[in-house]
Amino acid sequence: MEFSDVVGLLVLAMFVVAGAMFLALSGICWLLGRRPLVGVAGRFDCWKVEDVKNRKIYVASSWRNERQPHVVENLRDRGHEVYDFRHPGGQEDDGFSWRAIDPDWESWTPEQYRQNLSHPAAVQGFRFDLMAMEWADTFVLVMPCGRSAHLELGWAIGAGKESFILLGDDQEPELMYKLADHICVGWNDFTEKLG
């Protein structure tokens, strides 16, 4: 038997054992009337079914924010429905980008910008986001982010949606964040407030 075959069998055995452990722990959760969830960093939790409020969540953030995909994934792992502006129609669908209209979009004049708001790609991207905003009952602003995400959160607060701000590490103070229902420092604080 080759060394690579032995390594392959060991890796396969590790996955089988991990899967069996997950199934056993999940079974215990269900027997206790709880819901098994794998959270941040693979931590296993048993939640009381009645404690888990399945929400429809709009995550507002920036394309440049590396935390956004993890927030979306972890919220889905907790049983929530989550709108992902990066993939509004599913993983195969890339969300709106100004680059789709013009690769040189950053050098537009104000007139070009205003004109391109009517471009079919911009109209469709706006429609997807607005429909998701109307659908959601909960908004999460994941810092750092820019103008669009802040406008979305402001709209949500005005529409009476429950709002959370998940602060970043280098957070500049902002007085108007007092409008939000919850200001969260870190993932654990956020999930505790989310319920």
Image (spheres, rainbow, N blue to C red):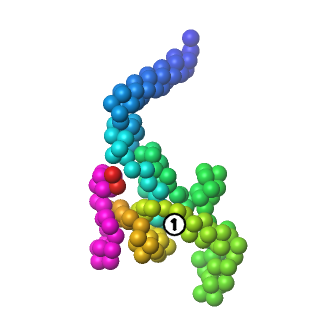
Residue 88 percent coordinates (x, y): 59, 58
Q: How crowded is mark 1: few (under 14 residues within 10 Å), some or many (20 or more)?
A: many
Q: From the viewer's perspective, is 183 left or right of 98?
A: left
Q: Which residue is at the front of the view, 161 or 115?
A: 161
Q: Does the magenta stretch include residue 182?
A: yes
Q: Quarter holding the N terminus? A: top right
Q: Name the residue under label 1.
A: 133
**What amino acid is found at the position of numbered circle 1 in the picture?**
Met
At 49% across and 62% down in the image, what residue appears?
136
Q: From the viewer's perspective, is 135 left or right of 125?
A: left
Vertical position of residue 120 compared to residue 189: above or below: below
Labels in figure, total? 1
Q: Is any part of residue 138 visible from this angle?
A: yes
Vertical position of residue 102 compared to residue 47: above or below: below
At 61% across and 62% down in the image, what residue appears?
95
Q: Which residue is at the front of the view, 49 or 181?
A: 49
At 59% across and 77% down in the image, what residue appears?
106
Q: What stretch is highlighted in magenta?
A: 171-193
Residue 114 percent coordinates (x, y): 62, 84
At 44% across and 54% down in the image, what residue appears?
55
Residue 23 percent coordinates (x, y): 43, 26
Q: Which residue is at the front of the view, 28 or 11?
A: 28
Q: Is any part of residue 143 visible from this angle?
A: no
Q: What residue occupies the far bottom of the structure in this picture?
A: 111
Q: What residue occupies the far right of the structure in this picture?
A: 120
Helix, strand or loop status at disc 1:
helix
Occupied quadrant, residue 170: bottom left
Residue 98 percent coordinates (x, y): 62, 71
Q: Which residue is at the front of the view, 165 or 53?
A: 53
Q: From the viewer's perspective, is 185 left or right of 107?
A: left
